[in-house]
Image (spheres, rainbow, N blue to C red):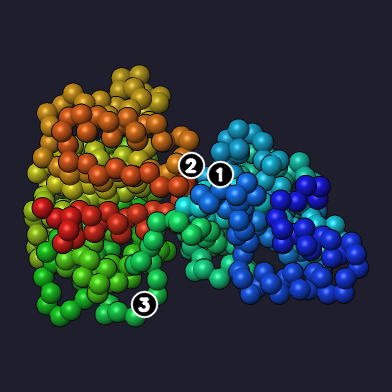
């Protein structure tokens, strides 16, 4: 390494150069004790930033030729730009330490992984879609990060999570022992739905939350546990969550599809009312989604406001569609701008790192505000990332259904 911004790494480098016995061992003991990545004061003295140094310990039995750091959305942006070079970690000479430092705002949150390379650097830095998917399939979490990992779907390994001191709190993402609700799986007209009911024998739901991408929120991210903690804290009224799986039809169903939206409104909600006593009240019914799901949630409130009076869009793909000459980009934004005003409330949030979505979300917010919609809008310092969305979803449900937000 040449320039080393991290004081801890400079101490290691100087100790190794001077032949100090146990310098590297002491460094790793400190990293294990404090946890990684290392978070140090900003080199420029700005209290709104931190110097964050990611560390990877080389395997002595299979040394790496390179190590690629994958920080969600931050690395993705350069992958889209065709050059991942700046995400290559650097070895501290004479040690097993690979390191890379980023100067980040002190409210940043992101999931991240490492990809050790054992061959050609050019191969490791390939940015085509197939190579990138392969990289994600092989990437590893940080073994020295003590925070709970972010689980992944399928065979991919979990990711570690960086949450800097001023990142938004996520009080319901812990492991507190609370009364558990019940989950049951169903097939409804060919679609898989998981129903999560609130804790307590015979407790009647007072609200309904329809969650798109149910296969992520259910078995992978344990939204049920999050809802249980929210119920136990009194932050949420007894709420029935309906988790709808995409079943391989995500980009068909979640791109302003009339048939899917009407299925949610006319099949799913009445079924939940019959089977589980879920209220059929638009002011107590939330539809929520992320990315394309955020687009679909905002569309559902626009198309069927008599069913969905509340909508949560996280990092909504409001650029859609770019390649449809009949509709044109940001079609849904124009529908909200020109159509009759709907009696709905919306929660919109988007990450400051989401270069591909930030401007479009801001434009939709401006349209909703100018049309007089009841809209809650916020920008978080993160990316297109379930590490951010899981806390944001809890905040949105509290904001729309909780004792302070419901009206």
Comparing 179 with 213, the one in front is 179
Comparing 104 with 371, the one in front is 104
- Residue 206 shown left or right of residue 76 in the figure: left
Residue at position x 12%, y 28% in the image? 340
Callout 1 crowding tier (Cα within 10 Å): few <14, some 14–19, many ≥20: some
Q: Is residue 202 above or below residue 207?
A: below
| Residues tagged 1 and 2 counted as in contact (Cβ below 8 A) | yes
Task: Indicate the secondary structure of the residue bearing disc 2.
Answer: loop
- Residue 7 sits in quarter: bottom right
Q: Position of residue 128 (x, y in %)?
A: 62, 37
Q: Position of residue 286 (x, y in %)?
A: 20, 52
Using the rendered image of the protein, determine whether residue 200 is visible from the camera's viewpoint: yes
Residue at position x 21%, y 26% in the image? 337
Give the total of numbered labels: 3
Q: Which mark is residue 74?
A: 1
Task: Indicate the secondary structure of the residue bearing disc 3.
Answer: loop
Query: Which residue carries the number 3 mark?
Result: 176
Task: Estimate the spatial distance between the alpha carbons at disc 1 and disc 3, rounded to whole Å.
Answer: 32 Å
Is tag 1's residue or tag 2's residue first in the polypeptide sequence? 1
């Amino acid at each position: 390494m040449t320039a080393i911004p991290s004081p801890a790494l400079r101490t290691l480098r100087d100790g190794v150069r001077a032949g100090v016995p146990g310098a590297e061992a002491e460094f790793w003991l400190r990293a294990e004790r404090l946890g990684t990545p290392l978070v140090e004061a900003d080199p420029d003295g700005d209290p709104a930033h931190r110097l964050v140094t990611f560390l990877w310990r080389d395997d002595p039995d299979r040394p790496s030729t390179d190590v690629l750091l994958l920080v969600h959305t931050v690395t993705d942006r350069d992958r889209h730009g065709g050059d991942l070079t700046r995400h290559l970690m650097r070895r501290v000479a004479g040690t097993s330490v690979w390191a890379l430092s980023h100067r980040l705002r002190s409210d940043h949150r992101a999931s991240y992984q490492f990809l050790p390379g054992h061959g050609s650097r050019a191969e490791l830095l390939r940015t085509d879609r197939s190579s990138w998917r392969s990289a994600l399939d092989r990437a590893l979490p940080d073994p020295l990060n003590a925070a709970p990992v972010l689980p992944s779907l399928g065979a991919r390994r979990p990711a570690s999570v960086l949450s800097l001191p001023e990142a938004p709190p996520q009080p319901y993402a812990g492991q507190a022992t609370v009364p558990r609700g019940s989950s049951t799986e169903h097939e409804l007209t060919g679609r898989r739905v998981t129903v999560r009911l609130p804790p307590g024998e015979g407790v009647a739901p007072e609200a309904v939350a329809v969650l798109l991408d149910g296969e992520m929120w259910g078995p992978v991210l344990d939204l049920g546990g999050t809802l249980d903690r929210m119920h136990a804290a009194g932050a949420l009224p007894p709420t029935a969550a309906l988790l709808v799986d995409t079943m391989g039809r995500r980009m068909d169903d979640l791109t302003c599809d009339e048939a899917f939206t009407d299925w949610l409104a006319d099949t799913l909600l009445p079924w939940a009312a019959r089977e589980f006593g879920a209220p059929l009240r638009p002011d107590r019914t939330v539809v929520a989604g992320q990315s394309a799901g955020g687009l679909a949630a905002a569309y559902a409130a626009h198309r069927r406001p008599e069913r969905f009076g509340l909508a949560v869009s996280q990092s909504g793909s409001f650029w859609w569609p770019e390649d449809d000459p009949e509709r044109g980009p940001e079609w849904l934004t124009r529908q909200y701008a020109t159509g009759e005003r709907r009696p709905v409330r919306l929660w919109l949030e988007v990450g400051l790192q989401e270069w591909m979505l930030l401007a479009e979300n801001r434009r939709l917010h401006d349209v909703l505000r100018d049309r007089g919609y009841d809209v809650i809008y916020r920008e978080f310092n993160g990316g297109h990332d379930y590490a951010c969305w899981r806390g944001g979803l809890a905040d949105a449900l509290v904001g729309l259904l909780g004792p302070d937000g419901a009206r």
